[in-house]
Amino acid sequence: MVSPPTRVAIVTGAAQGIGLSIALRLADDGLAVAVNDIVPKASKVEEVASQIRAKGRRSLAVTGDVSNEDDVKAMIAKVVEELGSIDVMIANAGIALRKPFIETTTEEWERIVSINLRGVMLCYRYAAVEMVKQGRGGRIIGTTNLSAYSATKFAVRGLTQTVGEHDRALELAPHKITVNAYAPGFIMTDLAYHPDDSKNGGKPGSTIKKLFGLPLDSPEAGPETVASMVSYLASPESHFMTGPSGN
């Protein structure tokens, strides 16, 4: 019996935090993994690719801004050319501001929307085009979860449901492409740390919790917890799930 081809995943925003953990977990699951982040993080994303190769998996580091359509198209084309296909798209890249809504400028809001919503839409679209062309199904997964950050993430939830559910005149379900999202909540990554933590409870992440009204003793989890959920959503076993967001 001929073995099925190794599946290929793309993880955006993979230089650190949740994206890094997802990329390494998918490599452990047996996938070849292309990792993406912006040009200033090129050395970090190449280091992630090296860690994946050290696990015996193929990997590719691709820099680019997910809010730039040409960058996304070029990323997809490069991954297909060098790794052979796209079977899993993890649209993880996103930014957040450590300030209240009323202090957020219009320019800051527009940048958040550009990356967190437009960027996800572009990754969804161009990954879906390639998956339909390949004709063997696929997994498209986004992140939905400060004010301006949450607003864009709820928009991602709506986008995910619209392109993923069976009952909405949808294009992707007949092609065996599922579309799901994960909503991580408070995760202990680099984004959780703040210089004022020492005077806002003393624990790492206490300032961000205080800013958003979370109890200082609220439950915490590391990025590996999120990676475990994404691992399932990316797996063949999740074929019956499409449209929802996992909290």
Image (spheres, rainbow, N blue to C red):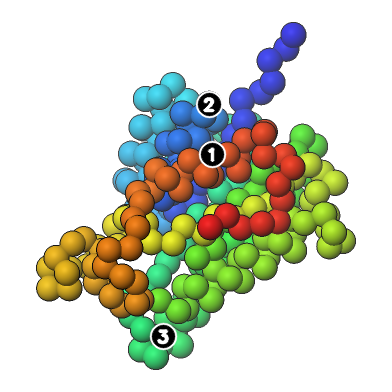
Position of 19 with respect to 160 (left or right) is left
Residue at the (34%, 72%) spot, across then down: 214
Distance from Cα at disc 3 to Cα at disc 1 = 33 Å
- Residue 27 showing in the rendered view: yes
Q: Residue 3's image quarter?
A: top right
Indicate the quadrant containing the N terminus: top left, top right, bottom left or bottom right.
Answer: top right
Position of 11 with respect to 54 (left or right) is right
Element type where label 1 sits in the image: helix
Element type where label 3 sits in the image: helix
Residue 182, relative to residue 6: is it above or below? below
Position of 176 with respect to 193 (left or right) is right
Q: State which tag comes first along the sequence, 2 or 3.
A: 2
Q: State which tag comes first along the sequence, 3 or 1.
A: 3
Between residue 245 and residue 96, name the one nearer to us: 245
The residue positioned farthest toward the bottom in the image shown: 102
Between residue 19 and residue 147, name the one nearer to us: 147
Residue under numbered circle 3 = 101
Distance from Cα at disc 2 to Cα at disc 3 = 42 Å
Residue under numbered circle 1 = 231
Residue 102, relative to residue 233: is it above or below? below
**Relative image position of residue 54 (x, y in whole percent):** 37, 25
Q: Amino acid at mark 2?
A: Gly
**Relative image position of residue 13 (x, y in whole percent):** 44, 53
Residue at the (24%, 72%) spot, across then down: 207
Q: Amino acid at mark 3?
A: Phe
Q: Amino acid at mark 1?
A: Ser
Element type where label 2 sits in the image: loop
**Relative image position of residue 154 (x, y in whole percent):** 58, 71
Residue at the (34%, 77%) spot, across then down: 213
**Relative image position of residue 52 (x, y in whole percent):** 41, 31
Residue 178, relative to residue 112: is it above or below? above
